[in-house]
């Protein structure tokens, strides 16, 4: 059974790209379009990793990471942003959170995920 990833992004094209990148790598992916729907998924299921965009409607990615950390301090979180690390207040990110800049390449995405998930 593959590792379960919750991927949160409001852009359906990014979701399709991630699905194409990760299909065949053995990951089970659940998609959510914003932080609120991600929290509902997080309540219903367990995940090995959360990936989230920063800017989304209803609840942004930083708010989502803080909410996730209230109930799970160990799950790795990858924050995906088109703004780059220099635009994100890195010191405000919860522990065990990594930033991945958009656009990202397939190999970098898989390498980042594999470095965070304990098999």
Image (cartoon, helix red, strand yellow):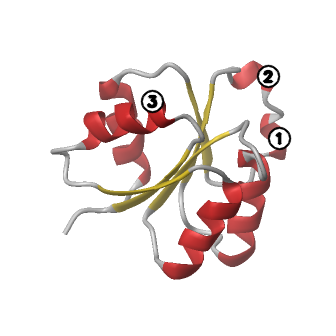
Give the image location of residue 65, x and y in percent: 70, 56
The image quarter in which residue 28 lies = bottom left
Give the image location of residue 42, x and y in percent: 56, 71
Q: Which residue is mark 1?
A: 91
Q: Which residue is mark 2?
A: 87
Q: Name the outermost residue toward the left.
A: 24
Please state if 109 lies on the left or on the right of 78 as rendered.
left
Do callouts 1 and 2 mark residues in contact (Cβ within 8 Å)? no
Q: Which residue is mark 3?
A: 13
The residue nearer to you, when weighing 56 against 104, is 56
The image quarter in which residue 81 lies = top right
Q: Count residues near mark 3 (Cα–Cα under 10 Å), then give few for <14, some for 14-19, many for 20+.
A: few
Q: Secondary structure at mark 3?
A: helix
The C terminus lies in quadrant: bottom left
**Distance in Å between CA atoms under marks 1 and 2:** 12 Å
- Counting residues from the start of the chain, the first of labels 3 and 1 encountered is 3
Please state if 57 lies on the left or on the right of 8 as rendered.
right
Mark 1 or 2, which is nearer the eye? 2
Give the image location of residue 70, x and y in percent: 75, 73
Mark 2 or 3, which is nearer the eye? 3
The image quarter in which residue 54 lies = top right
Give the image location of residue 57, x and y in percent: 75, 44
Q: Count residues near mark 1 (Cα–Cα under 10 Å), then give few for <14, some for 14-19, many for 20+.
A: few
The residue nearer to you, when weighing 47 against 91, is 47
Q: Secondary structure at mark 2?
A: helix
Q: Residue at x 27, y 35 (%)?
A: 20
Q: Is residue 73 above or below residue 87?
A: below
**Distance in Å between CA atoms under marks 3 and 1:** 30 Å
The N terminus lies in quadrant: bottom left
**Distance in Å between CA atoms under marks 2 and 3:** 23 Å
């Amino acid at each position: 059974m593959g590792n379960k990833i919750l991927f949160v992004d409001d852009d359906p094209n990014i979701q399709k790209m991630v699905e194409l990148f990760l299909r065949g790598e053995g990951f089970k992916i659940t998609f959510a379009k914003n932080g609120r729907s991600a929290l509902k998924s997080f309540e219903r299921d367990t995940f090995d990793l959360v990936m989230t965009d920063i800017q989304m409607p209803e609840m942004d990615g930083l708010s989502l990471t803080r909410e996730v950390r209230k109930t799970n301090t160990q799950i790795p979180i990858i924050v995906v942003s088109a703004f780059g690390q220099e635009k994100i207040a890195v010191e405000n990110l919860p522990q065990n959170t990594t930033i991945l800049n958009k656009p990202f390449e397939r190999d970098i995405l898989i390498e980042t995920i594999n470095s965070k998930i304990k098999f």
